[in-house]
Image: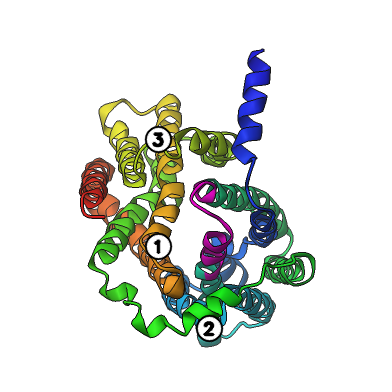
Amino acid sequence: MAIQKVTDLYKNAFKGIPSAIWWQALVLIVNRCGTMVVPFMSLYLTQCLHYSFSKAGVVLIFFGLGAVTGAFLGGWLTDKIGFRKVQLLTLTGGGILFIVLSQIENYYAICLFTYLLSSINEAFRPANSFAIAYYTNDENRTRSYTLARLATNSGWVIGGALGGLLASINYKYLFWVDGLTNIAAVFILKFLFAPVVISKINKQQKKSNTIGSAYKDKKYVAFVIISCLYAILFFQLFSSISLYYKHEMHLSESFIGLVMALNGIIIILTEMVLIYSLDGKAHKLIFISIGSFLLASSFVVFNLFKSSAEIAIIAMVLFTVGEMISMPFMNTQWVAMSKEENRGEYAGLYTMAWSVAHILAPSIGTFTADHYGFAILWWFLGALGLVTSIGFYLLKKSV
């Protein structure tokens, strides 16, 4: 009986999601299966091309700047030509540039093409977010964004494992696989996915001159700024947390890999059911606030308890639950605060917040840990998370 209830719960969690969203999820999982260049970029530059750590760092800065540019351009283009065309153009352009970048060894050319590649790749995100919003309604939108996150996480898990294998053979294979998966995603979107008619968007766009800009929407700008603070917390997962596990907790690389994988595994297995159970029970910003608080708590536990493998796991579970409660609702919140006529601009500004945080987060984490120690870093991130949680809660009163 209990097994039947669990089975029904999972069925209901996925029920009612439009077929268009499943196609979008397939595009995401194919695309993300090839997302392996970025995690190995610094190793490629230092181990394969023999550039210094500082030069590799500069290339990553160009990648971050390109992400900010791409988020802006992607949102703008989505409103001008439609989300489908933007997705096709960015996937095609990204696929070609990945392969081109694998053939370049001149440092300045690498910086330039890394910036271009990142700009085109990141322009895909606002268009994809717009597409999910367009194909859904209030009843299934949060679960649809959650399905997209499930697809993304699944792709990351597959891509990370495959990337490590390919890197051990030849780093250049990473670029080719990334490029080819982009092209494969284009094939799915172009030839297998029959889109709905989007003339409605085009008609409404003619009236866009009467719609206020996202950049002048004070409530939305406040939401974006607080989201950026949240993203700074989130991106510690890929920088300071793994460093702490290794250098302070003295955990083995294999155990660190398992703890980090726990994040993706929990999300894949439980997030859809969790969101199905929570959706509609309270205001979205309440869930986002609670998730932010749990995220902050995951850092503070490192200072409250003696370092151990068990504490590493507990912290990761707290981090993951906080992420699951907040991030799907953050996606639907930006949609709720936008209008379809210029939703691409809103999506672009929201994506920019995450791109900026992607640049700031590693610097903030590593600088604080290096100069003041990890204990100060965890207290700082806990305080920042508390401010973020309160910020989202207070924002609820004005939206």
User: How dense is the environment of label 2, judged by Cα within 10 Å: few (below 14), some, or many (20 and up)?
Assistant: some
Q: Quadrant of residue 228?
A: bottom left
Tell me the residue that label 1 is attached to.
Answer: 354
Disc 3 residue crowd, few under 14, some 14–19, many 20+, Cα 10 Å: few
Residue 377 located left or right of residue 191: left
Viewer can see residue 17: yes
On-image quarter of the N terminus:
top right
If you read the primary sequence from the N terminus, does the residue marked by circle 2 or circle 3 appear first?
2
- Total labels drawn: 3
Dot 1 or dot 3: first in sequence order is 3
- Which numbered dot is residue 281? 3
Q: Residue at x 48, y 81 (%)?
A: 205
Amino acid at pointer 3: Lys
Up the image or down, 310 lies above or below 300; here it is above
For residue 328: magenta?
A: no
Mark linked to residue 107: 2
**Depth check: 320 or 76 in front?**
76
| Magenta region | 127-142
Comparing labels 2 and 3, the label whose residue is closer to the camera: 3
Amino acid type for the residue under numbered disc 1: Trp
Distance in Å between CA atoms under marks 2 and 3: 53 Å
